[in-house]
Every structure is written in C-alpha cells, then in structure tokens.
Amino acid sequence: MNKVEPIRDADKVQDVLDALRKKDMRGYVLFMTGIHTGLRISDLLTLKVRDVKDREYISVHEKKTGKERRFTIHKDLKKVYKEYTNGKEDYEYLFKSRQGKNNPISRMRAYQIIKGVASQVGLEKIATHSMRKTFGYFIYQQSKDLAAIKEMLNHSDISHTLRYIGVVQEKTDRLISQLTFKKKRGEDSE
C-alpha cells in the first residue's frame, strides 16, 4: 500500500479546487468538505443534505472510532453548501451517486475523483485520505497547536499526529538537504 501525503502547498490546493469546480461540482464539494473538516472518506460519504443545509455545525458518528464528533462549518464551506444543496431534498446523500435512487458515491469513485484531479494538476501520492492530512497540515501550519489537532483527528499520540500530517517527513527532508561535509572557513584539520 502506497503512503499518501497531504497537499502542503496552498497554491496546489487552489489548483485542485479550480480544476474540480470546472469539471465536477460534486467532487469540488467533496474536496472542500474533506479539507475543511478532516473527516475520513467513510464518514464523508455518509453525510446527507440535512446534515449541512442551513447548519452551523456538522455532527458525525465516526465509523472507525465510534466517537461522536461535532465541528463548526467553515464560512467558505457554508457558501458552497448553500449553492450545492439548493433544490436537493434533505434525505438525499450529499455526495449522491448517479446510479440508483439515493445512494452515496462509492469509496472507489471518490478515489477516482481525487486521484484524477491530482494527476491533472501534477500531484503525486494523493488520494482521498490526503484531504484529511491536508486539513491537519494546514491547521498545524496556522496554529502549531498539536494537542488540538491530535484531538480533532482522534489520534492517541502527538508523535503519530506529526508523522500523519507530514511534518516529520518535511523536517527530515529539510535536515538532510542542509547536511554538509565541507569544512567551514577557518577550521584547521588535525
């Protein structure tokens, strides 16, 4: 299994959003929701229109952890939901499949949407879980509040959170690139 990464560049996040908005509104809303909530794909796909329409918060019972999670809907996401849910019934899945009467898209379809747009904008090691990692990475970059991020992602250990959001790898890469074996001026050899 290949390890997926967060998107660490805000311009690349915007490239993904721009490409999705032009191509697939459902994919755009899926990606916006993923990077603004940090929900796993299994929880994103269970959302219904009533869970987000005219709401201040989203409440989810996480499949993996069994924990209840409640979070504020970001103002940018509220605007997107208002446009996207217009004309949709409350009982409909937010990311409704075009096949069947009222089923969510499959995890595989979500993967295809994210992987396809990532390839289109030149990103590698990106899949559906990258949305959750991107959320954590940007929250960390803007706040440095690891304890809060650990809680938001329902991790048991801060060191796991650092690895998960790619901060450990980023720091390792930076340290290796700064490595030198050249002597500094003025140093004598023995």
Image (cartoon, rainbow, N blue to C red):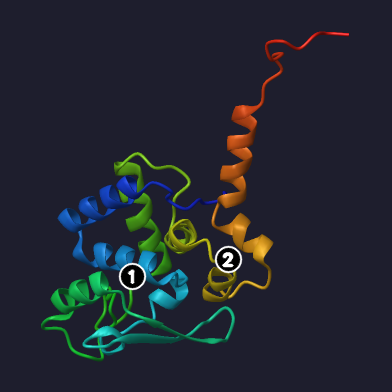
Residue 182 point in image, percent of width and height:
69, 14
**Is residue 1 visible to us here?**
no
- Horizontally, is 44 left or right of 3 in the view? left
Secondary element under disc 2, as helix, strand or loop, is helix
Residue visible at 19% across and 64% down in the picture: 25
**Three-letter code for the amino acid on which mark 2 is drawn:** Leu
14 and 21: which is toward the camera: 14
Above or below residue 27? Residue 127 is above
Residue 177 point in image, percent of width and height:
59, 29
Question: Which label sits in the foreground, 1 or 2?
Answer: 2
Residue visible at 27% across and 76% down in the picture: 96
Give the quarter of the image for residue 108: bottom left
Q: Which residue is mark 2?
A: 146
Dot 1, crowdedness within 10 Å: few (<14), some or many (≥20)?
Answer: many
Dot 2, crowdedness within 10 Å: few (<14), some or many (≥20)?
Answer: some
- What label does residue 33 carry, if any? 1
**Three-letter code for the amino acid on which mark 1 is drawn:** Thr
Q: Earlier in the sequence, mark 1 or mark 2?
A: 1
102 and 17: which is toward the camera: 17
- Horizontally, is 74 left or right of 172 in the view? left
The quadrant of the picture occupied by the C terminus is top right
- Horizontally, is 190 left or right of 84 in the view? right
The outermost residue toward the left is 87
Residue visible at 22% across and 50% down in the picture: 19
Secondary element under disc 1, as helix, strand or loop, is helix
**Is residue 16 visible to us here?**
yes
Mark pair 1, 2: CA separation: 21 Å
Give the quarter of the image for residue 101: bottom left
5 and 89: which is toward the camera: 5
The outermost residue toward the front is 186
